[in-house]
């Protein structure tokens, strides 16, 4: 698939078929994705790829946490976005709630939706991305690059992805289940699987601000 086309059609998948992704496909996909650039070729990424019984156990653990509304304690603190970033995020969330028919005051339905994120939107597999604790902020920049590669390479195999901070909100539980050392910082998770194209959730597309809002030109 053309690289520009891949960038334009990539979107967050919020409903997956239950069909597991073969290990060989995930291995080939990741082997391509780690061609991502990184600061001085430091390659500060590591992956825990989850499927089968381990995936089901992970979903159950996180569902209990989400339903109980336990306090999250991610390795990377959740951001408190100032304006205009807060408004961009809020507008996107409001549009999604409208698609789902969830009212602003409907806390029960909001909790149900919230819990779906911790279930990886039904994806049969996920990838937990982590790195060593104490590294420079550039380690996270590197991870952003490899995560983008994963989401784009997935399209070649007919796969969809959702980049989720939700799962890594409970890092101790993930470390225990997946045998990730305490010395590692959990950064992000990626739900991956075959999209359920009949689900209306997968019709949703987030907005982008106009290019001239975020760009200045010099010497043209």
Image: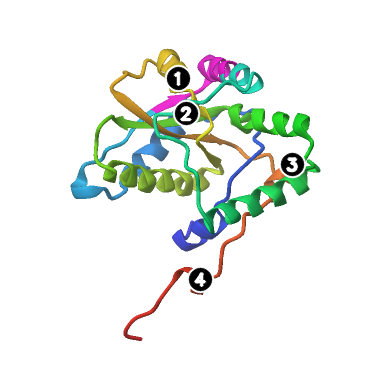
Separation of residues labelled 4 and 1 (CA atoms): 39 Å
Q: Nearer the viewer, residue 84 or 41?
A: 84
Mark linked to residue 168: 2
Give residue 61's position: percent from left, percent from top. Answer: 56, 16
Q: Are marks 2 and 4 in contact (CB under 8 Å)?
A: no
Give whichever of discs 2 and 4 has the lower sequence position: 2
Q: Are marks 1 and 2 in contact (CB under 8 Å)?
A: yes
Q: Which residue, given by chain and number where applicable, does mark 1 sit on?
A: 174
Give residue 84's position: percent from left, percent from top. Answer: 54, 59
Give whichever of discs 1 and 2 has the lower sequence position: 2
Mark linked to residue 213: 4
Say whether residue 53 is magenta. Answer: yes
Q: Secondary structure at mark 3?
A: loop
Q: What residue range appears in magenta? A: 48-61
Separation of residues labelled 3 and 2 (CA atoms): 26 Å
Circle nearer the viewer, 4 or 3? 4
């Amino acid at each position: 698939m053309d690289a520009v086309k891949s960038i334009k059609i990539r979107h967050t998948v919020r409903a997956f078929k239950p069909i597991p992704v073969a290990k060989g496909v995930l291995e080939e996909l990741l082997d391509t994705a780690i061609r991502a650039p990184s600061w001085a070729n430091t390659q500060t990424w590591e992956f825990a790829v989850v499927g089968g019984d381990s995936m089901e156990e992970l979903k159950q653990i996180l569902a209990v946490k989400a339903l109980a509304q336990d306090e999250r304690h991610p390795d990377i603190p959740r951001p408190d976005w100032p304006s205009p970033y807060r408004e961009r995020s809020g507008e996107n969330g409001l549009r999604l709630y409208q698609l789902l028919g969830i009212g602003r005051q409907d806390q029960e339905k909001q909790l149900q939706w919230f819990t779906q994120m911790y279930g990886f939107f039904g994806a049969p597999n996920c990838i937990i991305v982590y790195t060593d604790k104490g590294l420079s902020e550039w380690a996270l920049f590197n991870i952003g690059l490899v995560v983008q590669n994963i989401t784009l390479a997935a399209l070649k195999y007919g796969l969809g992805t959702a980049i989720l901070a939700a799962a890594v909100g409970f890092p101790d539980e993930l470390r225990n289940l997946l045998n990730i050392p305490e010395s590692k910082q959990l950064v992000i998770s990626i739900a991956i699987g075959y999209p359920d194209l009949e689900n209306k959730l997968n019709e949703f597309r987030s907005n982008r601000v106009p290019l001239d809002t975020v760009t200045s030109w010099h010497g043209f």
